[in-house]
Image (tube, rainbow, N blue to C red):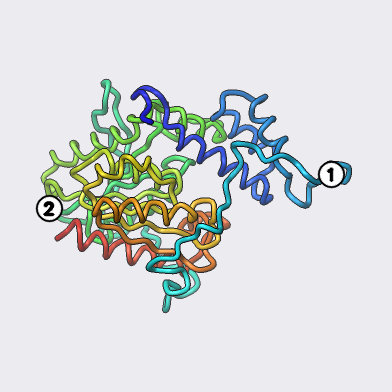
Amino acid sequence: MSQPNNARDESLAQYLVDEFVEDYQEGKMSRRDALKRIAGIVGGLAVAESILAACAPPPTLAPTTAPTAMPAPTTAPTVAATVAPTTAAPAATIAPTAAPATGGLNVSENDPAIEAKMIQYPGQGGVNIIAYLAKPKGDGPFAAILVCHENRGLTDHIKDVTRRVAKAGYVGLGVDLLSRQGGLDKITDQAQVPGLLANAPQTQNVQDFKDGMTYLNTQAFVSKGKFGMVGFCFGGGVTWRAATGIPELKAAVPYYGPIPPIEDVSKISAAVLAMYGETDTRITSSAATIEEAMKKNNKTFEKMIYAKAGHAFNNDTGAAYNADAAKDAWAKTLAWFDKYVKA
């Protein structure tokens, strides 16, 4: 069922809660940090406490006197390994073949082949949207790729991804979805970022990217109407939603993001390539569902499931980085854009 436009996207908010619960249970995040992030999403510390209290703590932190059986919370991550995709492109067939173990993707802000800078453009309601723009040197015109950040905001890593887009011959636009709060740099407590993102009106994130396209279409160095989009984690979910809400998108590549409402799949015009990690069962378990919906609606769709890769395997600043999977996925991402955006 659709929600009012001024309501937040509950499925994206739930995705973030589940992610922090999972990080806590796997020992990747302290209880204190998980509580702060979850509280910002669910509206208070007491609710966040109840969510974590109903979850088994990390094995190393499990109290010896605690009951061994605990009820599963309604907000706990759903790990549905039994519904892992069985159709084309199984994980075992997609393992990268020749990528070295480290290095190779990063693009310096001083790279002589590109130009990069922070910009602002007009957004809905008279707000100026902050963004990072990177383009190849020269007049162009160049096709353009929108870049959506993770739940941490427009970080240096996402700026680097935007420069990678420019290095590949596209204009890249990394949008700061915290622009109404002054941008990521103005947020003094980073634990507040997920809540700020989760509580935005459901149409706002997609609208910010629509307005980014409007801005780019006024620039002489941009090929009018040639747009793609890529996003990661939370940004993968926004990318899926942009695909349902921006018919002008030619291609979209969501990396391990929550799928859109199935009833909205019929609205997708973009060719979609979805990236998943084999061990990221909370997200990868939905790959079969979206594949079936895309095929039922006669949409262009492919998926990649990378063996032994987990959630956030593309982020080379995090512990989950998988160099081989990241390099292979990025090569396929660019090939997808070359086929459906540049052509």
Q: Crowding near pointer 1: few (<14 within 10 Å), some, many (20+)?
A: few
Residue that extends furthest to the front in the rendered view of this protein: 296
Q: Amino acid at mark 1?
A: Pro
Q: Residue at x 76, y 52 (%)?
A: 59
Looking at the rendered image, the quarter that the C terminus falls into is bottom left
Viewer can see residue 135: no
Q: Residue at x 68, y 47 (%)?
A: 25
Mark 2 secondary-structure assignment: loop
User: Which of these two is toward me, 76 or 37?
Assistant: 76
Viewer can see residue 41: yes
Q: Is residue 5 above or below residue 103?
A: above
- Percent from the top left, x then y, of residue 31? 70, 39
Seen in the image, is 233 located left or right of residue 132? right
User: Which of these two is toward me, 338 or 121?
Assistant: 338
Comparing marks 2 and 1, which lies closer to the viewer?
1
Q: Quadrant of residue 214?
A: top left
User: Which of these two is toward me, 282 or 44?
Assistant: 282
Q: Quadrant of residue 117?
A: top left
Q: Amino acid at mark 2?
A: Pro
> Residue 270 bears which disc, if any?
none
Residue at mark 1: 63
Question: Residues under labels 2 and 1: Cα distance?
Answer: 61 Å
